[in-house]
Image (tube, rainbow, N blue to C red):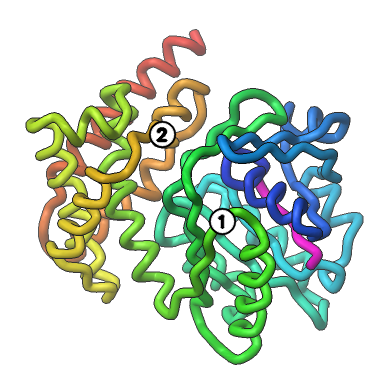
Amino acid sequence: MNIVVIGAGGIGAFYGMILHEVGCNVKFIARGENLQYLKKNKMKVTHPNYTIEDKIDSYSIDEFLETFNPEDIDAIFIATKAMSTESISKKLELWTKSSIKIPYYISLQNGVENEDVMERYYDKSHVIGGLTRLIVSHTVSLGHVHCEGEVQTLIGAVNPDKENSEFLSNLKTILDKTETSTFICEDIRLELWNKLIINNGVNAICALIQEESGPLIRNEKTAKLIYGLMSEAAKASNAVDVNLTQEDADKMFELMTEFQSVKPSMWVDTENNRDLELDDICGVVIKNCEKLGVDAPYTRAISTILEFTYNKKRDSLSE
C-alpha cells in the first residue's frame, strides 16, 4: 500500500515507521528543521519491545503535491495538530480536483471535529476517522520518537459503504502485521468523543499543573477536577447527537485510574513553545455545552487559566 503521513511527530512517525516495517511504501510530509533532518537522516522509533530505524523519503507538502499524482497514493494519514486540518485539506482538495482516483484520508488527530472539516473538502466516502489509545508517544529529539504502551488503533468510515469497508479491512490486515492491535468501528464518532472525554479530563490540567496524569488522578482533590472535566465532555456530546451519558464518563474515569501515568501532549507543547490545541479539545466542550444551554465551569476555568498563563509566558520570551 502506498501511504503518505502528514506530520512526522510522535504519532505520525510511529505509524509511518511501523507501516514501513511491514512493507508499505511510506512517505513523510514534514516541515521546518524536522523536514531538513529527515531529508538527510534516518527516522528512529523506539519502544520498550522494539526499535525501527530507516531512511524515509520526506517532503514539504508543496514539494509532495508538485511531485506526485493522487492516483499513485492509496491513503493519507493526517497526524498534525487539529488546527492545521483545514489548511491541509484545502491543499489536498486542489491536488485531487481533476483526479479519477483519490486516496483515503485518515485522521489520527486530537479532537472530534477534524472529520467534519475534511468532509467539506473531500469525497465524504473517503474520510476515515481514527484514534489511538494505550500509547504514549513523544519526539525525543530530531528524528527520534519514543513510544510506550500496547498501542490500539480504532478506525472507521464516517460514511460507511462497500468500498471504504473493503479499504478498512485491507488496512487492518496490514496493521495486524505490526505489534499493535487494530479495531474497525461502526460508529467512529462515538469513539472520538469517548477519547475527548479523556483528553478533556487530563490534557489541559496536566499542562497547567505540570504533572503527569497518574499523581493527579490519585489525589483526592485533583481527581474531582478531572472527574468534572470528563463529565462536561460527556454532556457536550449531546449537542451533536452522540449522546454520551454520565455513565460513559464514569467508565472513562475508571479507565484512567487503571492506565499508566502519562505526560499529555499539551504539557509537551508548553515545554516546546508550541501552539496548544485548547480550542479543539476544551473549546469544543465549552461550545457544545453552551448549545445545550449549560456552562462547562471546570473546562472553562482550567483552559482559561492555562491559556492566560501560557500566553503570558510566551509574550515574555518574545520580548
N-terminal-most mark, 1 or 2: 1
Q: Is residue 152 magenta?
A: no
Residue type, mark 1 in image: Thr
Q: Is residue 28 visible?
A: yes
Q: Is residue 203 left or right of residue 81?
A: left
Label 1 sits on residue: 180
| Depicted 286 relative to depicted 177: above or below | above
Instruction: Label 1, secondary structure: give it.
Output: loop
User: Residue 280's x, y, as percent?
Assistant: 40, 50
Closer to the camera in the image, 17 or 126: 17
Considering the image in quadrants, where does the N terminus appear? bottom right
Q: Is residue 117 visible?
A: no
Label 2 sits on residue: 266
**Boundaries of the magenta span:** 1-7
Residue type, mark 2 in image: Met
Number of residues whose C-alpha sits closer than 10 Å to that of mark 2, classed few (under 14), some (14–19) or many (20 or more): many
Instruction: Label 2, secondary structure: give it.
Output: helix
For the point 51% across and 12% down, the residue is 318
User: Residue 6's x, y, as percent?
Assistant: 68, 50
For the point 84% across and 30% down, the residue is 41
Which numbered dot is residue 114? none
Q: Is residue 204 left or right of residue 156?
A: left
Closer to the camera in the image, 114 or 164: 164
Between tags 1 and 2, which lies in front? 1
* Measured Cα–Cα span from mark 1 to mark 2: 25 Å
Q: Is residue 121 left or right of residue 67?
A: left
